[in-house]
Image (tube, rainbow, N blue to C red):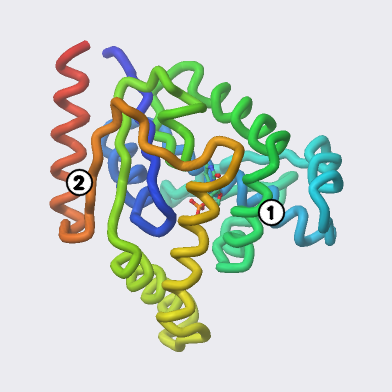
């Protein structure tokens, strides 16, 4: 059967990776989390105290990113052979990732690898520029949105859960962070987040996870039927 590329873009914390993983499982496709790749570069920069852009650009030649499939079916992000899946999920690494993602050379470095990963199609890739820059020819493009308040609430809950139910940061701080990140993602000079003209917008503010998955599977099957 013919395989396609599914590109999922959207704001931070609007559930892109959840729906991307679910659709990958449904279709039997490979899931690729491009945010994790920017986070891996950020993590490397933080570990090596690289403060300015030229240092980060120079370090790219020493950065090798991979995804390793685990026995439970999940994928872990690997940086030079080290499993960094857990430490890259913090707010601090997310913020640094948002900064390093503004560097043109970092984007070129990662986009090239992302394009190679999709060369044989059969992938669900999520990020900010997948439908516009990485795979403008993707057969199915989804643009996910949810209100900043809904996204901040979800992120707050997630951070609480990760920390054994205790909040180390207030909801207001998380909301502030969401708004900040949105601004940076949509206003940067290099490949800013924007909706591809042919993307289907999925606003999941009022959708349950199941409802969203049903909708996305319908969109996927409809697209496959046209091939
Ligand atoms: O989706 P995420 O929160 O894991 O992404 C981390 C940062 O990386 C986010 O601030 C935006 C950036 N990013 C990007 O610029 N392009 C992508 N394709 C994916 C993520």
Residue at x 58%, y 56% (from the top left corner)? 85
**Residue under circle 1?**
42
Q: Give the camera-side residue of 179 and 86.
A: 179
Residue at x 32%, y 30% (from the top left corner)? 141
Q: Position of residue 146 (x, y in %)?
A: 28, 57
Q: Position of residue 30 (x, y in %)?
A: 42, 33
Q: Quadrant of residue 54?
A: top right
| Residue 13 - label | none
Q: Is residue 172 above or below residue 50?
A: below
- The total number of labels drawn is 2
Q: What element carries label 1?
A: helix
Residue at x 64%, y 36% (from the top left corner)? 107
Q: Is mark 1 within 8 Å of ligand 1?
A: yes
Q: Position of residue 174 (x, y in %)?
A: 46, 74
> What's the distance in space between the residues labelled 1 and 2, CA to CA?
31 Å
**Residue under circle 2?**
213
């Amino acid at each position: 059967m013919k395989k396609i590329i599914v590109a999922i873009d959207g704001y931070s914390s609007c559930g892109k990776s959840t729906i991307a993983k679910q659709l990958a499982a449904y279709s039997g496709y490979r899931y690729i989390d491009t945010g994790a790749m920017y986070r891996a570069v950020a993590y490397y920069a933080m570990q090596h105290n690289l403060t300015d852009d030229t240092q980060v650009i120079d370090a790219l030649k020493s950065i090798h990113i991979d995804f390793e499939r685990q026995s439970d079916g999940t994928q872990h992000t690997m940086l030079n052979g080290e499993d960094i899946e857990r430490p890259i999920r913090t707010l601090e690494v997310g913020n640094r990732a948002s900064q390093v993602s503004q560097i043109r050379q970092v984007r070129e470095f990662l986009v090239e690898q992302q394009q190679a990963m999709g060369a044989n199609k059969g992938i669900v890739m999520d990020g900010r520029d997948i439908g516009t820059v990485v795979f403008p020819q993707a057969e199915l493009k989804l643009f996910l949105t949810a209100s900043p308040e809904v996204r901040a609430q979800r992120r707050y809950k997630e951070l609480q859960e990760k920390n054994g139910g205790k909040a180390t940061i207030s909801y207001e701080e998380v909301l502030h962070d969401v708004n900040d990140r949105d601004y940076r993602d949509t206003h940067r000079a290099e490949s800013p987040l924007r909706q591809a003209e042919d993307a289907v917008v999925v606003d999941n503010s009022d959708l349950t996870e199941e409802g969203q998955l049903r909708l996305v599977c319908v969109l996927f099957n409809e697209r496959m039927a046209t091939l």
